[in-house]
Amino acid sequence: MSEYAIEAAGLRRTYRSRTGWLRPQRREVEAVRGVDLTVGNGELFGLLGPNGAGKTTTIKLLNTLLIPTAGTARICGFDVVRQTREVRRRIGYVFGGDRGLYDRLSARDNLRYFAELYGVPGREQKRRIAELLELVRLAGRENERVEGYSRGMRQRLHIARGLLHRPRVLFLDEPSIGVDPVAARELRQTVADLAATGTTVLLTTHYMAEADELCGRIAVIAGGRIQALGTPAELRHHADGRRVLEVEAYGVTDERLAAIHALPRVREASLEVIGAAQVLAVQSDAGVDVQADVLRELDGVRLGRVTARQPTLEDAYVAIVNRVDERRSPEAVPA
Ligand SMILES: Nc1ncnc2c1ncn2[C@@H]1O[C@H](COP(=O)(O)OP(=O)(O)OP(=O)(O)O)[C@@H](O)[C@H]1O
């Protein structure tokens, strides 16, 4: 058995497309710009990054759905371009959202159908399906039609589907997208249980908290490149020596956020929407108090609590990703 479940070296992918009708222009988007990565057998590895960072493209290169423009990748030692069949036998792919299941069928019948499709031998099907229903905590609900399932239950059923043929490596692309917080917690439990069975999991997510809770190591990807890679504790160091001012607000515009970010002693400024409120997090160097400057920029905006706190992993993530935005070359170049 290969030492690594996933290996990527210099992986690149450029999309070429045409835009415009009257004066068509060829455009190239370098979605993945040289990714080097190794994931050990049985690891639960997170790929984290903002929209358009290149996460899905990276996954599709690794799971043989896209061919790399350059570079190589191996799954369990098999080359994703030259040994696709060997690779496909060893991988499962589950993506977010709730398409791809048969609503009129029960969970069990969905799994039976896909087991047939994936060539799971008849005598094994029953046991495997029962095992998986147990793993994704749908045992007891397996005879109900999927149309009555919540999003979280559907997502867990998707995971079961992706595991029917006992893949060594499971790609989980944004599993918690559109799922409510309680269901997301159940989903995280399923992913943790799955990793405990020894399956290697590559998980992509927008949510740092999710990656922090689940993953042994995380790669932060932005602008098509890995910007930082390590355990959650190691990544946290990217915000060492910072302090964070947190302001609850209602109605901060993009312009105001940009103005705060541009303040001379501000290192980062980010905005998160939590229910009806916005939470503005402003990073500065540890010894620097930017509160007065920030509040001046927020003049006229309704504010709630203002607190100073130590940086979290989320702040480290913002620092890593913003660093990229600042020095980023244009993403699309006319061909
Ligand atoms: N089929 C395609 N044709 C052209 N450009 C594409 C295509 N798919 C993705 N892109 C572009 O490639 C870049 C990376 O996209 P990708 O979907 O890999 O990012 P992502 O990190 O998965 O983002 P998200 O979190 O939004 O899904 C983006 O700029 C995107 O617009």
Image (cartoon, helix red, strand yellow):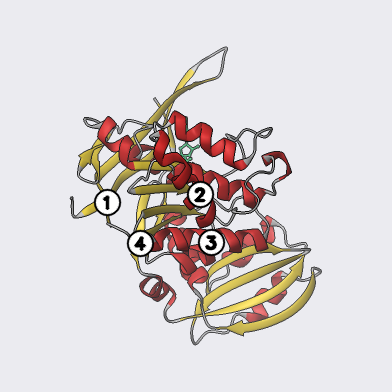
Dot 4 falls on a residue whose secondary structure is strand
Residue pointed to by mark 1: 5
**Which of the 4 image quarters holds residue 98?**
top right
Q: Label 4 amino acid?
A: Ala
Mark identifier at residue 228 = 4
Mark identifier at residue 102 = none
Residue 42 versus residue 280: which sits nearer the camera? 42
4 or 3: tag closer to the N-terminus: 3
Label 3 residue near ligand 1, CB within 8 Å = no
Residue pointed to by mark 2: 130
For the residues labelled 2 and 1, the Cα–Cα distance comes to 27 Å
Q: Position of residue 187 (x, y in %)?
A: 56, 58
Query: Residue placed at 37% from the left, 45% from the top?
Result: 166
Q: How many marks?
A: 4
Q: Position of residue 277 (x, y in %)?
A: 76, 66
1 or 4: tag closer to the N-terminus: 1
Give the answer, above or below, for where 95 lies relative to 298.
Answer: above
